[in-house]
Image (cartoon, grey):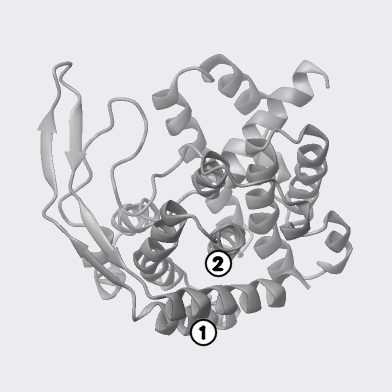
Amino acid sequence: MSARKLTVFTLTVAFFSGAVIFSSCGDAPKAENPEPMPEETAQEVNINDLEGASVSSRKETIKKIFYTIPAPMEMASLIKSSGADYDSDVLNSVDNIENYITKKQQAINLGVYGADLSYTTMFERTKESLYFFSATKALAEDLGVGGVIDDNLITRVEANKEQKDSLLSIVSDTFWSLNAKFKDDGMEDYSALLIAGGWIEGLYLASNHVEGNDELRTRIAEQKYSLDDLVKLIGTYDNQDNLADMKADLEALQSVFADVEINKSKTETSKDENGTTVIGGASSVTMSDETLAAVISKITELRAKYIQ
């Protein structure tokens, strides 16, 4: 692969998977020397407060919610580190891209393929990763947002690829550029569909590797809060008619997660010997085998619906 293509591939992995954008389960960003998260967590954000809010205020509220949605790359990393074996059968076939004719289908499956790209990359399956890279790029172009990844952006990523804080900022800016492009084209709601597609696929992949894996089981249970935040995020966009099906499906999944109990201790903030802010706090998760089975069944059903 040429150096230019490799750079584009690296950027796409980071951007579409959200790997370096946000941390999982509502904790602090995982960039080096992260800034502490606001004491007001995303779960405490009242979506009704967005009505009549200024553009900047609304943007910050969305960011608070978006910070709590786990990155598909993080889920893929956990799957890999747990010792699970690579399974190509659980991925969405790139041949299905021909079925995605509507903008809604393209946006959702841009997120799905981004999560699959994360998975194949984590397992160092270069050939398969290139297939999913091509699929994500093609869908981005179909949606009219392929130009967001321009030569200047690629150059910036290449120059800062070893600086996590800088890369965090670059990729975050890229998301908002994409969001702005969707908005300019009257398709701002497709940002939410992209995010939802990636989250659904990440949870689906995890569910296919959870057997005998307590760590992964805990992470799946923790998606109860992430799902709440995802539904709230969808509620911040204007074109709710286009998001109605997705929101209803995610709300149905919320009811399945209702029996999951997560008891969080008080978050404590401190500084280590290097002056870096450390945000800590333990939590306990209770999820029965029956609830886990129900979650797996429901996410499999939803995923099948959206990749057809």
- State whether residue 272 is above or below residue 264: above
* Residue identifier under label 2: 189
- Coordinates of residue 196 in the picture (x, y in percent): 55, 64
**Residue at point 44% right, 32% down?**
168
Q: CA distance from mark 1 to mark 2?
A: 15 Å
- Coordinates of residue 281 in the picture (x, y in percent): 17, 48
**Residue at point 57% right, 73% down?**
299
The quadrant of the rendering that contains the C terminus is bottom right
Circle nearer the viewer, 1 or 2: 1
- SS at mark 1 in the image: helix
Give the amino acid at mark 1: Ala
Tell me, yes or no, if residue 152 can be seen here.
yes
Q: Crowding at label 2, few (<14), some or many (≥20) Cα neighbours within 10 Å?
A: many
- State whether residue 134 is above or below residue 287: above
- State whether residue 120 is above or below residue 243: above
- Coordinates of residue 51 in the picture (x, y in percent): 30, 73
- State whether residue 195 is above or below residue 75: below
Q: Which mark is residue 216?
A: none
Give the amino acid at mark 2: Asp
* Residue identifier under label 1: 248
The quadrant of the rendering that contains the N terminus is top right
**Is residue 75 toward the left or the right of residue 69 in the image?**
right
Return the disc, 1 or 2, that comes first in the chain's sequence.
2
**Residue at point 64% right, 25% down?**
154
Q: Nearer the viewer, residue 70 or 90?
A: 90
Q: Nearer the viewer, residue 277 or 283?
A: 283
Q: Nearer the viewer, residue 164 or 284?
A: 284
- SS at mark 2 in the image: helix
- Coordinates of residue 197 in the picture (x, y in percent): 60, 63
Q: In which image quadrant can residue 288 be found?
A: bottom left
